[in-house]
Amino acid sequence: MEGSGYAKAKAMVRENTREHLAGADLPQKAVAAWIKLPAVATGKFKRDCETLSKYWKASADLLGKLPKKPRRTREQQSAAELILSESRRSRELFLKHHADEIYRKLTKNLSAFKRVDQLCDDAAKLVPGLTPTRKQIDADDGLQGERDGVTVDQGIFLAHVLANAESGMHLCHAMLLPKPEAVDRLAEFVSKGVIDFGPARVERKGKAAIVTIQNPRYLNAEDAYTLADTETAADIAILDPATEICVLRGGPVEHPKYKDRKVFCAGINLTHLYRGMIPYLWYIERDMGIVNKMFRGIAVGANGPDEIYGGTREKPWICQLDTFAIGGGCQYLLAMDYVVAGSDAYMTLPARKEGIIPGAANLRLTRFVGARAARQAIMMDRRFDCDTPEGRLICDVIAPPGEVEQAVMKVVEDFASSGVVSAAGNRRALRVTEEPLDLFRRYMAVYCREQAYCHYSPALIANLERHWNAANRKI
């Protein structure tokens, strides 16, 4: 009876699926073949890879028979959403069984370190259909609202990898390693004391290695063109043997309202986001890469970067907050050891108006301003003016607008004069009570999946058009 009931329920699901796809003008043979394919993991790796890869290929082929998203009817878009949701459900089930085994195969049993972009690309080769190929990602082009969001599958994959303690910690380790570009150019910096990458500049000034964000046309916003060079600059600042402290600041901008003034950071480039120019993995590379390196330091070879058994090469970070720190700019502040701000500066996390999760701010902001104020900032756009009691919970020194840089160098001098030998130890001791690496791993497991869905949500597009007038802005 139980087997008979299961068969009836399965037949009912198939019939409902067939009816749901009926008005989408899809070839009925292709629909019938897709519905009949098994989409459940059994727990046996080889069999599940073969079975599910066939199902994912059939799903992609069926989706490809529909017009591109902007040209679909309501029924066709509903069919696309069903195909995508069923495919993603099957990936979740598959990865519950096999995420750890896949990660071990991709990393040669945890002996090789791969950043998230390479890991996702290699997963697409190892288990076809599990994550999108480069070709599939490129084919899903256009404005952000015109995409089906094939890279959501990358988020599902990374979420399961990070959910496993051993593989997740190994991936965190991989993302904390210095970039090869930084290692290659470290000797140049040691010799010259300055490298200008364009989007970012790193220079030595006394005991400080200063990283300057340089995207003047966009108020020093962050995008796909700035991230890699800024992380390389930060790596070099941390690795430089001749300095003891790192400083993060923004350079002068071009916007008429702030012409020639220094601005810290305007967060993610919302125009680029709307235009589909910010890839999903940008968020993950940023928060597991440069931001986490500022907070934890750089991993050294195969030595674990956790606070208890391992360690990192790290320095204190000071932020020079001129004018404002919006979105991602504010997120940087939460990874700093010391913040020097102009008395006219302010901080915001406009997540509600953007429709995305503000990096690791949900994990860190409560430690500074408390849970209620953090919710107000993240969910209801509360602004923190630096020169207020609330602002001073994040900022350590408030200086007149024209004297922020001098105040920063005074802090650098104070740090260096008393020695910073204990800085790494104190940072680790603070982190192990507030945010050990394993807690960050668990947070990122949630973040990877949730941010993937936010990145392709219709609400994101509506928010950008309503609050940013994104449809009418020029790139």
Image (spheres, helix red, strand yellow):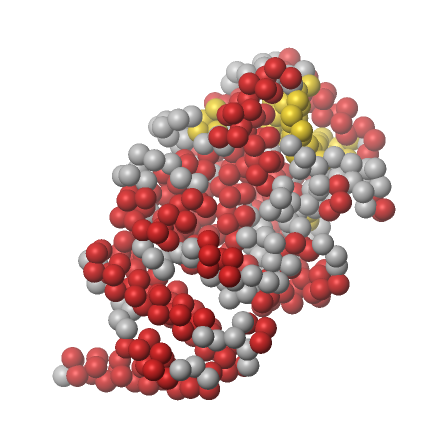
Q: Position of residue 40 (x, y in %)?
A: 27, 67
The residue shown at (60%, 20%) is 189
Counting labels gives 0
Q: Position of residue 403 (x, y in %)?
A: 81, 28
Which corner quadrant holds the C terminus? Answer: bottom right
Given residues 359 and 290, the one toward you in this image is 290
Q: Is residue 187 in sight in this rendering?
A: yes
Does residue 97 sit above or below 287 in this rendering?
A: below
The residue shown at (22%, 55%) is 45
Does residue 151 sit above or below 220 in this rendering?
A: below
On the rendered structure, is 262 left or right of 139?
right
Does residue 352 sit above or below 171 in this rendering?
A: below
Q: Position of residue 22 (x, y in %)?
A: 42, 86
Q: Is residue 100 in sight in this rendering?
A: no
The residue shown at (38%, 67%) is 87
Does residue 44 sit above or below 184 in this rendering?
A: below
The residue shown at (68%, 55%) is 271
Q: Position of residue 32 (x, y in %)?
A: 32, 81
Which corner quadrant holds the N terminus? Answer: bottom left
Given residues 137 and 382, the one toward you in this image is 137
Given residues 180 and 294, the one toward you in this image is 180
Residue 227, image quadrant: top right
